[in-house]
Image (tube, rainbow, N blue to C red):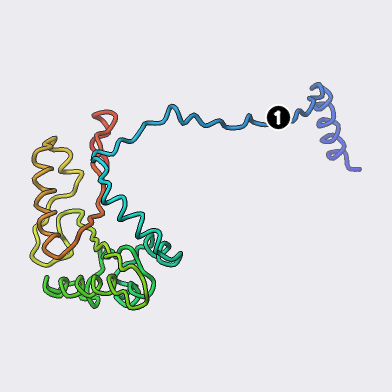
Amino acid sequence: MKPVTTFLMGTALAGMAAFPAVAQTVPAPAPAATAHPELWPRATWPYRADPAIEARIADLLGRMTLEEKVGQVVQGDIASVTPEDVRRYHLGSVLNGGNSAPDNDEFAPAAEWLKLADRFYAASVDTRDGGVGIPVIWGTDAVHGHSNIVGATLFPHNVGLGAMHDPALMRRIAQATAAEISRDRHRMDLRPHDHRAAGPALGSRL
């Protein structure tokens, strides 16, 4: 063995001998997680239950097939589903996202949006196959106003609106957006929520 190698090995062994042996311990298993539902916030439905509506819902659920129930919790986008898909699979909602438009035409006028909305609706209430025909929910992404429609009113980004600290203005903007999307039969708007940040240094978050 070469002298240098012998020296290095001897130094390493001497260093190891200088430290006492450390026993390897196996960590104890973590305690099982315990849920405390009594601490959870309780949601309160703001509207009084209507017995007639509840009876109508129970009747529909009792007559729906499993396929219809599954379809009702599925949402497709107009870029990938058609009115025939809504009829065949009993889809519950259809969304047009940020870049979706009738026939992939981003400049389609409002009249074309109305035609497509009517086609989806007609397909959803078609009961020729024996289904219950629940009307489809027609939704859109109107984050900064009804921006999918040419000529609609656009508003600044929500970060900027939140930084204005003007809740009354935010409400007016929401009302204007709701009025415009209703013209195209949209009944659902997916948009970020505005939250007040924990501290002023963080600003307004989406």
Lateral position of residue 129 relative to residue 183, left or right: right
Q: Residue at x 83, y 39 (%)?
A: 4
Q: Which corner quadrant of the image does residue 106 belong to?
A: bottom left
Image spot of residue 96 (x, y percent): 26, 65
Image spot of residue 33 (x, y percent): 57, 32
User: The N terminus appears in which quarter of the rendering?
Assistant: top right
In this picture, is 93 found above or below 43?
below
Q: Which corner quadrant of the image does residue 73 belong to?
A: bottom left
- Decide which of 81, 68 is in the foreground and name it: 68
Lateral position of residue 146 relative to residue 56, left or right: left
- Decide which of 136, 5 is in the foreground and name it: 136
In this picture, is 206 found above or below 44?
below
Q: Residue at x 86, y 31 (%)?
A: 10
**Secondary structure under the numbered disc 1 in the rendered image:** loop
Number of residues whose C-alpha sits closer than 10 Å to that of mark 1, classed few (under 14), some (14–19) or many (20 or more): few
- Decide which of 80, 151 is in the foreground and name it: 80
Which amino acid, by three-letter code, is at mark 1? Answer: Pro
Q: Kindly give the residue lying farthest to the right in the view shown.
A: 1
Residue placed under numbered mark 1 in the picture: 27
Lateral position of residue 58 relative to residue 20, left or right: left
How many marks do you count on the picture? 1
Lateral position of residue 37 relative to residue 33, left or right: left
In this picture, is 184 found above or below 47?
below
Image spot of residue 127 (x, y percent): 31, 74
Image spot of residue 59 (x, y percent): 35, 58
User: The C terminus appears in which quarter of the rendering?
Assistant: top left
